[in-house]
Image (cartoon, helix red, strand yellow):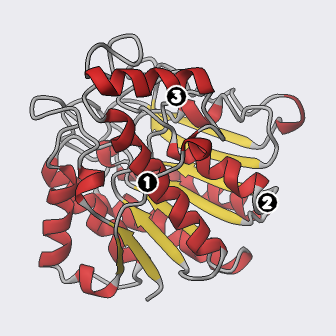
Amino acid sequence: MTVSLYIGDELAGYNFGDTHPFGPLRQGAFLDAARLAGLDTWAALHSPVLALQSDIERFHTPAYVALVQQRSLSGEGYLDHADTPAFVGVYEAASFVVGSVLHAVREVMERRTRRAFIPIAGLHHACPDRAAGFCVFNDLGVAIQTLRHDYGLSRIAYVDIDAHHGDGIYYPFESDPSVIFVDIHEDGRFLYPGTGHAHERGKGCAVGMKRNIPLPPGAGDSDFFAVWPELEAFLRLQRPEFVIMQGGVDSLAGDPITHLRFSPRVHAFVTKRLLALAEEVCDGRMVVTGGGGYSLPNIARGWTAILRSLLEIDD
């Protein structure tokens, strides 16, 4: 098996209840569609993995981790400014997201699998000292820190096609030249978190190592494909040693809280192009997370398109 797929009740448990956009049915919607298409039989299924506290603190401050642990016991209050509510067991649920992504990274780096997909992951808004935008712990930030410090990588490509800007990755690594950052998102003037302007291209010794591409509300496939060639050329020029993709499907047409109008063709295409890049420059090392998405039909279509591309199975 060349593709590891992380699925399980512990990951589905990362949700904020039936009435919240980030609800409990997201993993099931994807898994039902993947099984209907027979894709699950082509992937190596992995159970979720729990992160150690020391893993989480590779990116997050001990004080913030302690706050999450405290609120996890009571299930009361918020972990940010009223976007991300606590619930009983939130610490464990978020730790399974981090642990599963971290396990996937290690499996890829140690050549036990070639690539991996963790649908319930990609929590790209969480900051080192606080939650944000339904994101408690930033699994992607932990993964990047692990690749830098445990494996000595100095060129890690992070590509984000979620409708929302990946501010929880961009700003902590804004001055870090080891993170090659590409983010195509809805213009922050119209959508949370209000960041990701085109002029934001890194700071200090990382100037020029970041690309933020804000698109107007209503932008569709043609708008995406118009900007992609330059971004792929930029990525190829940097010759990354590892590729991380945040494949949020809230950029698909019909998502209830965003305004882009991509089709699943975009998600399939980006996965294929990044896979080809990874095969060319870094022995195929690639991990994909599912990111956002608040329409169950879109989740089913978008994430199965990603998995199909990772498996190199044609439609």
Report the quarter where the C terminus lies. bottom left
Tell me which numbered mark, 2 or 1, is placed earlier along the sequence.
1
- Camera sees residue 296: yes
State how many labels appear. 3
Q: Where is residue 173 in the image (x, y as percent from the top left)?
A: 71, 35
The quarter of the displayed image where residue 84 is located = top left
- Camera sees residue 141: no
Q: Which residue is at a point 33% across and 27% down the rendered structure image?
A: 72
Q: In this view, does 159 lie to the left or right of 239?
A: left
**Amino acid type, residue under disc 2 in the picture:** Leu
98 and 308: which is toward the camera = 98
Q: Which residue is at a point 15% across and 58% down the rendered structure image?
A: 28
Q: Mark 1 points at which residue?
A: 50
Q: Mark 3 points at which residue?
A: 65
**Amino acid type, residue under disc 3 in the picture:** Val
**Amino acid type, residue under disc 1 in the picture:** Leu
